[in-house]
Each structure stands twice: as structure tokens, then as C-alpha cells.
Amino acid sequence: MISTSILTGDSLRQRLERAIAFAARQLRATLKTWTPDRPAPVHTRAGKWYRPRELWTDWTPGFYAGQMWILHQITREPSWRAEAERFSRKLEPRRFDRDVHDLGFIFLSSYGRWHDLLEAGDPQKDRVRDILVTAGTVQSFRWNGCGSHGFLYSFNGPQSLFVDILMNVRLLFWAARHGAPAEVHRRALEHCRTTARYLVRKSGSGLGEEDGRVAHEAIFNAESGRGEFRCLSTQQGYSPFTCWARGLAWALYGFAEAFRYSGEEEFLETAERCARYYLKRTPADGVPYWDYGAPQIPNEPKDSSAAAIAACSLRLLAEATRDPALASECRQAAARILETLAGEEYLAEGHAGEEGILLHGVYHRPRGWGVDASTMWGDYFFLEAIEGALNSLPS
Ligand code: GLY
């Protein structure tokens, strides 16, 4: 269970401002090597930013540009905006990418942030909006509607539903709100319902089920005219029956956002169940082990990136829930997570030779990729969580 924060408002603010100053120095140094003419790095290896030659899926470059957008938002420095625009522009061709389920990750962290900064009436805003609407519409084409429960399918094929896709569905909601066809919105809703039904487990629905536990993948029969659910599975978790920590964090974020876009109570209630699981099952410092069912806990790696995503999501949920006790727990847990992540153990400051911002993330433990590393998404959501906290803490 997550313990309460030790730091008060003022000292937490100071710790977060210091983390932002460090992040800015670290990212400036990274920019010298990882220039716009090179593909973006994914995670660190022995402390140095690294991009694998063969990528499983190229889902992370928007988080590189996104960190520059956040630093611009917080510091108001024009140079961050110039860099953010430069790196975002490189991503534009990806809006037609039909091979991945990751367009929300790529575009909301880059073009989405750009769009929010532009004034209404600026012709550039229309152009940026069109790119986002196209990306959201293209993402909606990865549709398996052959059964009674449709969903956007993963890069593994039409049989596969991943929990991470919830984060990309946000782009469909966004696109539908800004001019994409109504079918894009309908698919987004149905995807969220299917995910809630199969991937977010309910106590009593199976042997040893715990409410709010999230499975990584569900497999369906993809034969035409079939579509029935076959089994749970996982790629990045320990097993189909344990809870991959980042999957839980994606679900928490994704359902809170699905509720914000749609107003559907089912999504709020699902986000609340995920949050209760996180609050109850996460260690006192707020950072989960990479999978809640990993066999050697406490001798397993923790995933700081899951904690950073959870800090953002708990704050979103605190705003949305009508349960005041849960809202207060979510706020306290978000503060506790940030206090930990911006502290000595997790912030790379003072750790010689580390090029990332946030230490101790995990990309893909079963394959041994990026274990105990900094990750592009961990750094991005850490900065996003700080941005949210600085906006709400007394100054
Ligand atoms: N592909 C999303 C993740 O690794 O969390």
C-alpha cells in the first residue's frame, strides 16, 4: 500500500522545480547527439541512450518531441518550442502508418501539444489539426469488427487486443471531436467497452481473480463471422494471469481519458477499479515492480515508467471521480510517487554516466530489453506528471 508523502507543498514544489532544471540540462545534452536527422532513441543501455537496430514497434519518438513541448510549457523558453517543432515535423509521415497501433502515443504527445498551444484562427492550427485528424482516422482502420465486440487490433494481428491500445484510442476520440467521421468515435467507444469487458478483471469472474487487475492481451477468434474471445495472454508481463504494471497504468490513464471524452459511466467506474488496485497493491514508495505477480518480489526490477504514468492518471481520476475519499487518496498517491521519482534513487541527477532523466524503468522484461533503464516514455510521463503537479501546488 502506498504511504503518505513526507514532503509538504513547498518542499515538494522545490524538489520538482529542481528535477525540471535537471531534465532541461539532460535533454539539451541528448539533443547534441540525437539530432532531428537521426531516428529517436528508445531506452538507455548502460546509461547511454540507445535505439535497437530492429524495433518491435516504433512507438516512442513522439515522447522525445513531447518532452521539449513540456519544457517549453513549464519554462516558456522559445528555444524549447523551436526544438519541439523541429522534432514534431519529422513525425508527420507517420500519420499514414497502418502497421502499428501506436499513433496516439506518437501524435498526442507531439502534435497534440502543439495544437493546444496555437491560437484559434492561426492557419497553422488548422494544419496541425488536420494531421491529428488524419492520424486518428488512419488508426481507426485497424478494426476487428468480426465478432460482437469490436476492437482496434495490435501489431500482432487481428486476433490480438492489447491494453496499451487504450492510450491510442484517445486519438480517435480527439479526431472525432475535430472533424473525423462519426464512425471513428463509435469505434473508440466500442474498443473501450471491449477492453473493459475482457482485460480489466473482476473479482469472482475466474479462479483467483482480483478486482481491477489488468491483463495485457486478449486473443479472439479472427475468422470471418466468428470473433469469440479465446484466452488471455501477455507480451510484456509475467503471465496472462498476473498484472503487468505498465499495462495497469495505461488502463488507468486510458479509462480516465475515455470518460473525459465520452462521459460514459462505465469508463469512470473501470478507471476507479484500476486505481484501487494500484493504490492497494503498490509498494509504499508508489513505484510498482514490473509485474505485480513477478515471482521473486522483492528481488525484481521496479518500473518507474509505470509509476510516472500512474502519477498522471491518478491526478486525472482525482478530478473525475465523485468519491471524495478516492479523490483524496489519488491526489496523495500522485504526490507520493513524484516525491519518490524526483528523489535521489530515481532521478538520474548525481548518477554519473546516466543520460536519461528517470532511472529504473523497464521496457520488456521477458525479452530482457531496457531492464533497469531510462525510457523515452518514462521521462515524458515524469515531466507530464510534474507539469500537472506544478499547476496545482500552491506557488
Ligand atoms: N508498447 C507500450 C509499452 O511498452 O508499454
Image (spheres, rainbow, N blue to C red):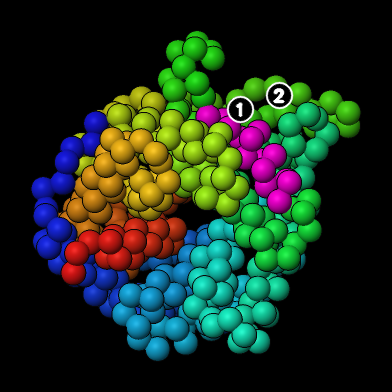
Q: Is residue 233 magenta?
A: no
Please name the residue shown 40% across and 89% down the image: 78
Name the kind of residue labelled 2 in the image: Phe
The vertical placement of 265 against 106, above or below, is above
Q: Between disc 2 and disc 1, whose residue precedes?
A: 1
Residue that numbered label 1 is attached to: 198
Circle 1 sits in a helix, a strand or a loop, which is it? helix
Which percent across, then down, holds residue 394?
A: 19, 64
| Viewport quadrant of the C terminus | bottom left
Residue with the mark numbered 2: 229
Q: Quadrant of the N terminus?
A: top left
Label 2 to label 1: alpha-carbon separation: 8 Å
Q: Is residue 305 left or right of residue 223?
A: left
Determine whether the residue tagged by mark 2 lies in a helix, strand or loop.
strand
Graded by Cα atoms within 10 Å as few (under 14), some (14 to 19) or many (20 or more), the crowding at tag 2 reads some
Which residue is rendered at x = 32% and y = 41% of the image?
Answer: 327
Residue 278 showing in the rendered view: no
- Which quadrant of the figure has residue 158? top right
The magenta stretch spans which residues?
A: 185-200
Are circles 2 and 1 on residues that touch, CB within 8 Å? yes
